[in-house]
Amino acid sequence: QQQVKQSPQSLIVQKGGISIINCAYENTAFDYFPWYQQFPGKGPALLIAIRPDVSEKKEGRFTISFNKSAKQFSLHIMDSQPGDSATYFCAAGHILTGGGNKLTFGTGTQLKVEL
Amino acid sequence: DAGITQSPRYKITETGRQVTLMCHQTWSHSYMFWYRQDLGHGLRLIYYSAAADITDKGEVPDGYVVSRSKTENFPLTLESATRSQTSVYFCASSEFLRGEQYFGPGTRLTVT
């Protein structure tokens, strides 16, 4: 059972363009929505995260948009650069007893930014 | 060096063999996690641990065993490896009451 659905599977964007990756979740108990970035041969690294009490969070060129009623959230990368070429994973999490988050990941989007 | 390390980075083993993947973190994070990464499936949680001697199953625990006798170490054992366990395995850690998980560099395991 896939609780977090991510699309598209792959994405090609021209340098300077906007990259948009979408995710949808099913479990309304999720209360933490991070995006992770992974370069080839490396482990994923946190890019940006949002809690459901806000509809948007922006950090530099990266923005998360969150729609609680639709159970959807998306990552927007403005002014996309070749260095942004990586695999992006959305995730949804809920608080574990005593703290910490248990994450369910999407299937990933391979982004390529062309010159 | 501070951080989270995994060993070995690459491992080839035969079906039926026991293999242990090691994970070590130097931050004294309470939570540690094991994931497997497969094309088309993303990252799937195998086991996690809230503290030493406290472990719990994730989404895909069958065929795996974990232990955590010390806060800094969280080994993952495949008791009798199968070809379906060929994957890239990532260990991660998380500070108490913080959401961010820090991932290790991964172990690429091939079961022949």
Image (cartoon, helix red, strand yellow):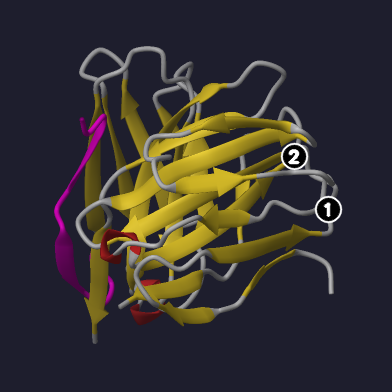
Residue under the image location 33 percent in, 67 percent down: B86
Residue under the image location 44 percent in, 60 percent down: A37
The residue that label 2 is drawn on is B95
Q: Chain of mark 2?
A: B
Give the crowd class for mark 2: few <14, some 14-19, many >=20 residues within 10 Å: some
Q: Is residue A48 left or right of residue A108?
A: right
The residue that label 1 is drawn on is B27
- Residue B15: x and y in percent read 34, 70
Q: Which residues are magenta?
A: A1-17
Looking at the rendered structure, which numbered label has been put on residue A32?
A: none
Vertical placement of A75 versus A100: above or below? Answer: below
Whether residues under marks 2 and 1 lie with C-beta atoms below 8 angstroms apart, the answer is yes
- Residue B96: x and y in percent read 76, 32
Give the crowd class for mark 1: few <14, some 14-19, many >=20 residues within 10 Å: some
Distance CA(mark 2)–CA(mark 1): 8 Å
Residue under the image location 66 percent in, 55 percent down: B75
Q: Nearer the viewer, residue A22 or B17?
A: B17
Q: Chain of mark 1?
A: B
Q: Is residue B102 visible?
A: no
Under mark 1, the amino acid is Trp
**Secondary structure type for disc 2:** loop
Quarter of the rendering containing residue A110: bottom left
